[in-house]
Image: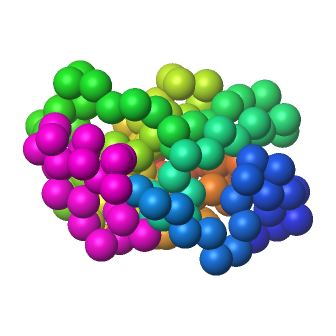
Amino acid sequence: MNKETLKILRDSGWYEGRSIDIKEIKKNLEKLGYIVFPEVKSFLEEFGDLVIEDPINEETHSTSIKFTSYYAYGAFKSEEKYAQEKLVPVGKIDSDYLILLVGESGKVYCNTGKLGDNAIEAWENLISGGGGKPWDNF
């Protein structure tokens, strides 16, 4: 991870080895019909409940959203079709413009495509401006 991405994440409260209690988040997701796969659980424990101010792209990314019935299981069927795996919403990115999703495999996506094969790669692509891989490139 480059120094600027690392600084932005640390300024947001993230640190290596971070592990928060996600019981409430997990309960809310399960109430909406999602299965909180082990890789989703790991992502939420390490990166959940953060508000990341990204001065490079002048955007905010949040993993502390309260899930509503709008995000009930089945809301991301087209994204799951492209990703070819079950997805779970874990936050909002690009100043609430896009939903951040983690797959059963641990790959990280948003509404427009894949951000990375893991959380670190996804944050690097998102913050550094490298972007991800659009759905039409799968």
Instruction: Let me know if residue 70 is in the magenta part.
Output: no
**Can you say which quadrant of the picture contains the C terminus?**
bottom left
53 left or right of 106 in image: right
Q: Quadrant of the N terminus?
A: bottom right
Does residue 7 appear in the picture of this structure? yes
Position of residue 28 in the picture relative to residue 100 (left or right): left
| Prevailing secondary structure class for the magenta stretch in the rendered image | helix
- Measuring from the top left, give residue 83's x and y in whole percent: 27, 55
Task: Please identify the residue farthest to the bottom as the structure is shown.
Answer: 17
Q: Quadrant of residue 60?
A: top right
Q: From which residue to which does the magenta span run?
A: 23-42
Q: Position of residue 84 (x, y in %)?
A: 19, 59
Residue 52 location, quadrant: top right
39 magenta-colored: yes
- Give the side of residue 137 with respect to residue 72, left or right: right
Residue 32, compared with residue 35, is above or below; it is: above
Task: Residue at 40% x, 56% y: name it.
Answer: 22
Q: Is residue 127 left or right of residue 77?
A: right
Instruction: Classify 95 as above or below 26.
Output: above
The vertical placement of 137 against 63, above or below, is below
